[in-house]
Image: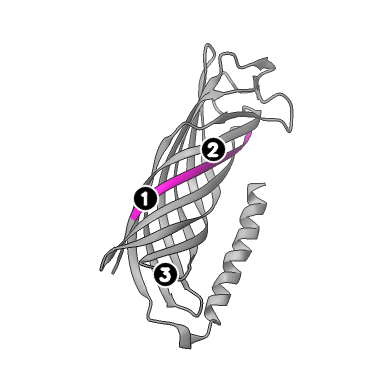
Amino acid sequence: MTNSIVKRSTLLIATTMIGLSITPTQAQEKGDFYVGGGLGFVVAGNTRADGVFSSTGSTFDGQRLGPEPGETASGKFNISPTFSVTVGYDLGKRRFGRFRVEGEVFHQKADTDSYTGLLDGSQLNPAGTVNTTMVGIAVNALYDLPEFAGITPYVFLGLGRAQVDTNYDFPGRGGVDVDGRSEIIQGGFGTSIAFKERMDIDLKYRFRRAGLNEGGLDTDIDAHILEVGIRYPL
């Protein structure tokens, strides 16, 4: 499911880039490189998984997580920290706004203490926990709406890759790590606020999804993130 979303999003970003190349140049002002960074929190989200543990080297190999094929065990994330660093290019003012492209490096932590469902046919009672750590890179396409009183709203869409580390811990049964690489898709909206002549403050919401297929499990990891950051032109 995640792969099909990524393919559709890749097409959308490519179409956006082609659109940029044919936008009338007379409406464009000189662009600029910039750097930025942000801190935030995963404020909501969940992880869902189903499958039979395999090749983990643990006692869980051969045990099913989730009631039956196609159904999932799941947990809701606690508030957890995340941060990112970006390098981007502002393509300059266009007729109806501005376009930007940027590369991003991010780190995301997301934990749950209420992972519910079945393990090898038995209800997880008490509920287990799953802790996730994600380190990755992404390319984002952003569109700035017209500025008003020093405030510039924008929307964005991004694609990337991440190393995803997950730790499952089931009380009385032990724990197991399932790690691997995943494609990620993200998107959201934000507001840039002119703070000083050479600095903007960014307030941002983003949704990020990773899909991990490792250790015999098919896992989706969804995160709703709120961030605050700064951006400097170079």
Residue at 47%, 38% in the rendered image? 43
Looking at the rendered structure, the secondary structure element under dot 2 is strand
Amino acid beneath label 3: Glu
Start-end of magenta stretch: 216-229
Screen quadrant of the C terminus: bottom left
Q: Name the residue beneath numbered marker 3.
A: 147
In 3D space, how far apart are the residues under numbered discs 2 and 1 (Cα atoms)? 19 Å
Q: Name the residue beneath numbered marker 1.
A: 228
Q: Name the residue beneath numbered marker 2.
A: 45
Residue at 40%, 48% in the rendered image? 227
Amino acid beneath label 1: Val
* Image position of 42 with respect to 194: above or below: above
Image quarter for residue 214?
top right
Outermost residue on the bottom side: it is 26
Tell me residue 160's x, y (percent).
51, 54
- Disc with the residue nearer the chain's start (2 vs 3): 2
Amino acid beneath label 2: Gly
